[in-house]
Image (cartoon, coloured by chain):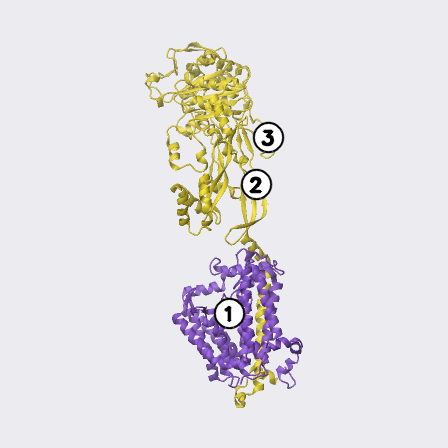
């Protein structure tokens, strides 16, 4: 107890009295040293306890944090599938190209780096503006592209100084290429950089690492097929985010190659014959719905769109009054005019409004009972007494005024709807319009007016409110040629695994067939269509044909003539000229092609549109292709670098 | 505790005969060099581990390891040299070294070089050095010198004298500002005062007063931004990319090491540069990452062994001067080890003290080894009084 007391309370007074007591002082120091040793022990024990807390109790949490520090997932974008035509002609591939990118975190001074680069290669303000825009939403430690398609010379110039420019990298990538340029652009479409609205809708996992997406055409509708699946690799990075080694890898699945039903030679013919007009030609194989050509004029070159077309060029395309970017085949809505008459005739037969033999007298105009308004026939003198066959062959309007009035809008609507009039055909291309098949209900809804009998007359000859797309017309013609057998139009013929090259052929996509009470109704209408070409309004194209054609001309009014005015093509401005239309299928005995042609402001269907259709059918049925086009395709084929 | 009338030291000493016996059996050669074999063994073990760790933490840079080995060699040479001197020389020179040190500190204030925002260096043309380093030795020497002839436990007046000897260099160094060194110098004096027998009541009183002043200081004196800085000190997670980054990464390094560690050269935090200062102040984190709880505890045990041996050697010293000096020196060593490992593991706020004999870097290493030289001298010359 004595010792404890001394330990606890050094007796100052006692020690002072004794002056320096060596033994006591030594004892005092020893006790203090012992206490210090105890404190040291406690201190180090506290550290050891802390280590247990960190390394044992929280080990898993800190392991996760350490891995989170060092392990990054890097997406491996897949290679996009190629696009071929039905004969294996290459329409879209990937070209190995080099672009310049900057990782901002590694570049010490971004502005200085940009200035340095400007001295070595050409950098436009647009490049830098785009770079800054992309940089704003790029995740940290990722390269942001600055310049695309570096030339070999530029690469060489940059490569020398690359070590002095931290964060600047030359990256190889694959750029989409359309070797045939504008040929078939409205069907093929193009890819472009993913924009912000698309970004918000996309699966971030699948698209991280991808920069491009199909924007229109097949590139867009078969995006999922062409794209493939993104792969991943786990990389270990240091604190600067620089990847050091690969820990694991899930390879990407390359996209499938796509074979279109389009024959690019036929496409070339269709585009060529239509040159000089704005308009569209759609050719369908009626036996299965395969689209053989889908031409829309004017065309444009898709290649500049791939890495972002410059603003000035885009404005020219976008504001041109010819609207080259508009896909007229799917989205152009035209009054079908007389090309609708075979369907009207069929409807009339189906509902018993007319029969094969019943006739109408045509004085050159038609008056509704109790009205003085004259609905004119295109032939001023009239056709005299006409039956159905002649009414179709000569395109007698009065016959169809009468038929439409008796049929009524409800039945007309019901019947034409079966041919996909007024609604999209469901083609495998984006943006298809349904156009307008008018009805009482439709008019009340959109025009806030009831349906008048006069509206039925206009609709009966494909005028008035009636609008159709070239694709709808081609589709309806195909259905007629097959006597009701109905297939959804499509451009995809087959897909192909890029590695094994195993092709999967697409089956036809049947639609509910159009059935009529008496199958002979079909023969009646088709006979009329044959007589259009053989002695009818389009008799000129029948001359010298090596196969029999069934067709129907159409001339759609762009503006309405006054009651006493006469249509005079020579005196009218071009933009007021009638649209020229023609629909046809051939050969009559065993139809293999159905065509719809629309030449805007082309004048008359028989004079302008029908010859174009004949050329397309000749090409397809007689293998008559344009040599200059096949030469161009050959040249593109020989152009070597095809990135695989 | 009943010791049958024998002095406590003698009673405890009889429990530790092994140490003396080792010294007598194989200490012949080392005795000739005035070195203590057990302490030397401890120092060499820690230095060796340190070099091995440095090779890993320094990204296998052999140049770095050789540089540190040269510094260690220099340190051990200083230790060996000082061990040869009888302690009476230290006692004689104590006040003069101290005065020279204070003069140099004043000189630094006037003409010192500024580096990293603090005025610490004195440029002597050929070499730059920090006079504050001298004070780490001069303060305990002088406090010990001051109490050498005075009766212990110290009287009030003597206590004030000892406190003043400590406070002057502490204030000058804190002014530079170099809080780490100021802490070491201040603690060196405080350790000497404590070992001299500073009253427990006074210690408790001082602790109580400090505890009372801090809240007042917090409320009335500190600015908002200063409070914020202290809060970040206490909770580094609140500023993960700024002040807290070091300590967060350090904790991740230690924690991810687990019980067995990731293995030598396999630490990810240090090798991938996530751990800042991985070969200097934060080398303990790198070590704990690679060698785990087992390795880190082994290192702590080694430190404890050195400190325990040092305290034992101090308690065997013949008189007041040598006892106080030896005790303070070994406790400074502890201070370094404790503050560094505590800081790195997030137990203590961030204070820039290196892990002794382990961290890469020079000045404090030489000072520490000089301290061990004095300690060796005191122990091996214990038959010769200092006066």
Task: Report how far apart the C-alphas of labels 1 and 3 lie in the structure.
Answer: 77 Å
Picture quadrant where residue A29 is located:
bottom right
In percent of width and height, residue A398 lies at: 41, 14
Residue A480 showing in the rendered view: no
In percent of width and height, residue B35 lies at: 59, 75
Labels 2 and 3 in the same subunit: yes
Residue A252 image label: 2
Picture quadrant where residue B308 is located:
bottom right
Looking at this rendering, what residue extends furthest in the front direction?
A: B126
Image colour assigned to chain A: yellow
The crowd level at tag 1 (other Cα within 10 Å; few <14, some 14-19, many 20+) is many
Residue A194 showing in the rendered view: yes
Q: A515 or B367, which is in the foreground?
A: B367
Which numbered disc, 2 or 1, marks the residue closer to the eye? 1
Q: Which residue is mark 3?
A: A504
Labels 1 and 3 in the same subunit: no
Specify the subunit that label 3 lies on: A
Check disc 2 and report its element: helix, strand or loop.
Answer: loop
């Amino acid at each position: 107890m004595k010792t404890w007391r001394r330990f606890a309370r050094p007796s100052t007074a006692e020690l002072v009295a004794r002056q320096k007591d060596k033994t006591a002082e030594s004892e005092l120091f020893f006790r203090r040293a012992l206490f210090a040793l105890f404190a040291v022990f406690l201190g180090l024990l506290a550290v050891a306890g802390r280590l247990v807390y960190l390394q044992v109790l929280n080990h898993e949490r800190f392991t996760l944090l350490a891995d989170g520090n060092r392990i990054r997932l890097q997406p491996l974008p897949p290679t996009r599938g190629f696009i071929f035509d039905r004969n294996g002609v290459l329409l879209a591939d990937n070209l190995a190209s080099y672009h310049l990118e900057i990782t901002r975190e590694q570049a010490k001074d971004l502005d200085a780096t940009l200035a340095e680069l400007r001295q070595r290669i050409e950098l436009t303000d647009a490049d830098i503006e785009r770079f800054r825009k992309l940089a704003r939403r790029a995740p940290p430690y990722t390269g942001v592209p600055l310049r695309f398609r570096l030339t070999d010379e530029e690469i060489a110039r940059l490569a020398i100084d690359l070590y002095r420019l931290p964060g600047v990298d030359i990256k190889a990538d694959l750029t989409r290429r359309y070797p045939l340029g504008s040929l078939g652009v409205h069907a093929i479409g193009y890819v472009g950089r993913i924009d912000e609205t698309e970004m918000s809708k996309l699966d971030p996992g699948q698209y991280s690492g991808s920069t491009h997406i199909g924007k229109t055409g097949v590139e867009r509708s078969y995006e999922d097929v062409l794209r493939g699946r993104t792969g991943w690799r786990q990389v270990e990075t240091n604190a600067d985010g620089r990847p050091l080694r690969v820990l694991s890898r899930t390879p990407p699945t390359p996209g499938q190659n796509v074979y279109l039903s389009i024959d690019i030679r036929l496409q070339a013919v269709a585009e060529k014959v239509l040159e000089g007009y704005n308009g569209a030609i759609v050719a369908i194989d009626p036996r299965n719905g395969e689209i053989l050509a889908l031409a829309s004029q004017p065309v444009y070159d898709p290649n500049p769109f791939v890495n972002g077309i410059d603003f000035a060029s885009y404005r020219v395309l976008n504001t041109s009054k010819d609207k080259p970017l508009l896909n007229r085949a799917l989205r152009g809505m035209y009054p079908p005019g007389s090309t609708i008459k075979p369907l009207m005739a069929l409807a009339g037969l189906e509902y018993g409004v007319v029969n094969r033999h019943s006739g109408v007298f045509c004085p050159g105009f038609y008056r509704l009972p109790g009205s003085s308004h004259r609905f004119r026939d295109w032939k001023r003198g009239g056709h005299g007494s006409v039956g159905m066959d002649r009414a179709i062959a000569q395109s007698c309007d009065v016959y169809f005024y009468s038929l439409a009035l008796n049929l009524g809008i409800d039945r007309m609507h019901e019947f034409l709807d079966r041919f996909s009039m007024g609604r999209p055909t469901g083609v495998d291309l984006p943006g298809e319009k349904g156009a307008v098949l008018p009805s009482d209900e439709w008019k009340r809804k959109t025009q806030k007016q009831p349906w008048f009998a006069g509206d039925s007359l206009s609709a009966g000859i494909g005028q008035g409110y009636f609008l159709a797309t070239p694709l709808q017309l081609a589709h309806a013609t195909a259905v007629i040629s097959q006597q009701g057998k109905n297939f959804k139009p499509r451009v995809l013929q087959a897909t192909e695994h890029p590695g094994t090259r195993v092709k999967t052929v697409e089956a036809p996509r049947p639609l509910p067939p159009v059935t009529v009470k008496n199958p002979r109704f079909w023969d009646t209408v088709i006979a009329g269509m044959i007589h259009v070409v053989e002695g009818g309004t389009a008799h000129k194209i029948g001359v010298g044909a090596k196969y029999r054609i069934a067709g129907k001309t159409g001339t759609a009014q762009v503006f309405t003539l006054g009651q006493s005015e006469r249509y005079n093509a020579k005196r009218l401005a071009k933009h007021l000229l009638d649209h020229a239309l023609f629909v046809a299928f051939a050969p009559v005995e065993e139809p293999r092609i159905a065509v719809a042609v629309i030449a805007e402001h082309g004048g008359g269907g028989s004079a302008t549109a029908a010859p174009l259709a004949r050329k397309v059918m000749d090409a397809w049925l007689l293998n008559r292709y344009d040599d200059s086009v096949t030469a161009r395709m050959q040249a593109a084929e020989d152009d070597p670098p095809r990135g695989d | 505790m009943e010791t049958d009338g024998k002095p406590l030291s003698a009673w405890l000493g009889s429990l530790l005969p092994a140490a003396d016996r080792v010294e007598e059996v194989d200490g012949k050669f080392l005795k000739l060099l005035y070195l203590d074999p057990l302490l030397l063994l401890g120092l060499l073990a820690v230095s060796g581990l340190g070099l091995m760790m440095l090779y890993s933490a320094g990204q296998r840079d052999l140049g770095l390891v050789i540089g540190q080995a040269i510094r260690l060699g220099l340190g051990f040479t200083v230790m060996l040299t000082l061990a040869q001197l009888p302690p009476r020389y230290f006692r004689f020179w104590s006040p003069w070294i101290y005065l020279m040190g204070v003069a140099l500190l004043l000189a630094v204030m006037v003409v010192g070089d500024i580096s990293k925002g603090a005025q610490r260096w004195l440029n002597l043309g050929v070499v730059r050095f920090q006079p504050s380093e001298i004070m780490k030795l001069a303060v305990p020497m002088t406090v010990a010198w001051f109490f050498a002839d005075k009766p212990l436990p110290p009287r009030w007046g003597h206590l004030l004298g000892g406190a003043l000897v400590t406070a002057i260099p502490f204030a000058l160094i804190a002014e530079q500002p170099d809080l780490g060194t100021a802490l070491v110098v201040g603690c060196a004096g405080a350790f000497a005062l404590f070992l001299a027998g500073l009253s427990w009541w006074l210690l408790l009183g001082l602790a109580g007063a400090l505890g009372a002043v801090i809240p007042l200081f917090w409320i009335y004196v500190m600015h908002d931004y200063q409070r914020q800085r202290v809060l970040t000190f206490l909770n580094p997670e609140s500023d993960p990319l700024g002040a807290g980054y070091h300590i967060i990464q350090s904790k991740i390094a230690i924690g991810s090491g687990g019980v067995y560690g990731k293995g030598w050269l396999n630490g990810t935090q240090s090798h991938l540069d996530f751990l800042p200062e991985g070969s200097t102040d934060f080398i303990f984190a790198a070590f704990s990452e690679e060698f785990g709880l087992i390795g880190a505890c082994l290192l702590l045990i080694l430190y404890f062994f050195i400190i325990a041996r040092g305290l034992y050697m101090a308690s065997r010293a013949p008189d007041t001067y040598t006892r106080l000096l030896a005790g303070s020196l070994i406790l400074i060593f502890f201070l370094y080890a404790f503050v560094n490992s505590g800081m790195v593991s997030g137990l203590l706020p961030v204070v820039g003290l290196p892990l002794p004999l382990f961290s890469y870097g020079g000045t404090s290493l030489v000072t520490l080894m000089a301290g061990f030289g004095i300690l060796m001298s005191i122990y091996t010359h214990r038959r010769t009084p200092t006066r």
